[in-house]
Amino acid sequence: MAMDKDWKLTGATAGAAKGNRRSQRERMLSGELYDASDPELSQLRVKAHELCRLFNASSEQERDLRSRLLDDLVPEHGQDVDCMGPIYFDYGCFTKLGSRIFANFNFTVLDTCPVLIGDDVMIGPNVTLATPLHPLRWQERNLRRHEDGSLYDYELGAPITIGSNCWLASNVTVAGGVTIGDGAVIGAGSVVTHDIAPGSLAVGVPCRVIRTITEADRMELPEEG
């Protein structure tokens, strides 16, 4: 699928606010401070969490059921997406998946900002893609009360883009605002807080590039029999 970085300004912003007033959904997807208790956003989260619950309660043999649930949870996805489960999406509708993606156990996507994943991406167990951010000062971060007494807070976020042909090994966390270039490999346990160049092998906390993947890394495949 095409990696359209302007997607958040098109299909994902359906239901735009009237006049000059921006909806909380628009503010969230644009990386601005927003009220996470907004009714529209709350409804979208409830739907996504219920779809995740149903997916996680299903058997791997129930392929048709899982396919339908994934279609509803992440409408923007390519062909041959295989999630082992359990999976956890905050919204799902703000994530775009390419084709031939494999996600191992405990794949978590907090997509308060758009998450874009290209084709042929391998995702190891316990991988988290976390777009949300919070103010550093407690004065802006702490819970507040609406006039009706209900609690809310102000949050923000930054998008995540993962190019095609990447491999994220087990227990990788990708922070908001990060772009991982095509063909990169992220080593197990890494915390990715900065962009990773295409074709790189990167590891560590924080994750850093240790070298470029080259022809010297070629492995001879067994003959098809």
Image: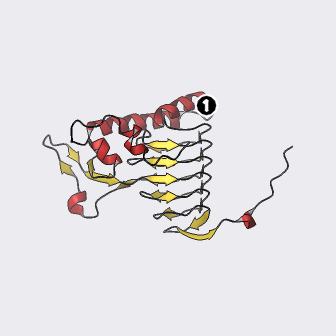
Residue 201 coordinates in the image, percent (x, y): 61, 65
Looking at the image, what colour scheme do you see?
secondary structure
Does residue 191 appear left or right of residue 34 in this picture?
right
* Residue lying furthest bottom: 210
Q: Quadrant of residue 170?
A: bottom right
Position of residue 163 relative to residue 18, above or below, is below
Does residue 163 appear left or right of residue 19 in this picture?
right
* Residue in the foreground of this view, choosing between 161 and 50: 161
Residue 140 coordinates in the image, percent (x, y): 22, 59
* Circle 1: element type: helix
Question: How many labels were placed on the picture?
Answer: 1
Residue 197 coordinates in the image, percent (x, y): 55, 63
The residue singled out by tag 1 in the image is 63
Q: Quadrant of residue 62?
A: top right
* Residue in the foreground of this view, choosing between 64 and 210: 210
Q: Residues within 10 Å of mark 1 (few under 14, many from 20)?
A: few
Q: Residue at x 63, y 32 (%)?
A: 61
Q: Amino acid at mark 1?
A: Arg
Q: Which quarter of the rendered picture does the C terminus lie within?
A: top right
Residue 223 coordinates in the image, percent (x, y): 85, 49
Q: Residue at x 54, y 62 (%)?
A: 189
Q: Which quarter of the rendered picture does the N terminus lie within?
A: top right
Q: Residue at x 49, y 48 (%)?
A: 116
Position of residue 115 relative to residue 218, above or below, is above
* Residue in the foreground of this view, choosing between 140 and 157: 157
